[in-house]
Image (cartoon, rainbow, N blue to C red):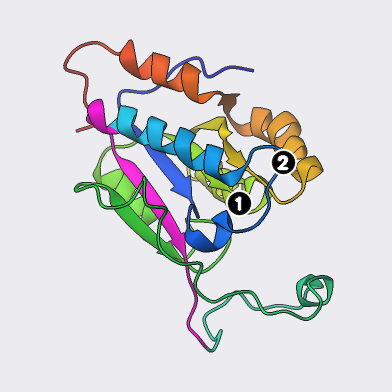
Amino acid sequence: MAVTVLDDRTALVLIDLQAGTLAAPTVPHPAADVVARAAELAAAFRESGLPVVLVRMTNSPDGADATPGRSEAARLAGGARRPYDLGPIAEPLAGYEGDVLVVKRAWGAFHGTDLDLQLRRRGITQIVLGGIATSLGVESTARAAHEHGYHVSFAVDAMTDIREEAHRHSVSYLFPLIGEPGTVEEIVGLLKSRPTGATSG
């Protein structure tokens, strides 16, 4: 399991690293560790002149623009409603000029957003994914990215889940089918080994 190559035009896409998701217990990595690794990765992408995309989940207060359909989610949560706004992007990641902010209303970051447009305008051919939760927002975005024709890589130590078995299924089974799972250290190493002057355009 390793990320072998980064295209000249690669973007980092970080999913739902917001106050609301960081407040919940996560496994196998604590949310604080995921944010720290994501911030390290984002700094390396910025230093390399490559885009950082921060994806934020929110819905209208009345839930009218939430994804419809019957599910057992409310019953499993004891009838509790999902917060319509998961809050601001985590402090170590927010506030950098030039970062791209994408607002989504479903698990995946492509459906109903301008993510694909933002990536294609920048000539992006590959994305590196991280965030919370592995089996929900990250996996949904990864599937869509693969179907849109992007090369997909995964910073598996910069993502985590609410259930360890769900995280491990995504990382060990699904992700190798559609991309290359690796570590933040590997990806940063590939960024540092890029030829001088390489840029995402």
Residue drawn at the location 49% of the way across and 73% of the way down = 85
The residue wearing badge 2 is: 167
The residue wearing badge 1 is: 140
> Looking at the picture, how far across and down is residue 195, in whole percent?
24, 10
Q: Is residue 149 visible?
A: no
Taking 15 as reference, is 114 above or below it?
Answer: below
Give, as a three-letter code, the residue at label 2: His
Give, as a three-letter code, the residue at label 1: Ser
Quarter holding the C terminus? top left
> Looking at the picture, how far across and down is residue 72, in whole percent?
82, 73
- The picture quadrant where one finds residue 46 is top left
Magenta stretch holds residue 177: no
Q: Which residues are magenta?
A: 46-61
**CB within 8 Å, label 2 to label 1:** no
Residue drawn at the location 21% of the way across and 19% of the way down = 198
> Looking at the picture, how far across and down is residue 124, in whole percent?
33, 37
Magenta stretch holds residue 51: yes
Single out the residue that lies furthest toward the left: 197
Classify mark 2: helix, strand or loop. helix
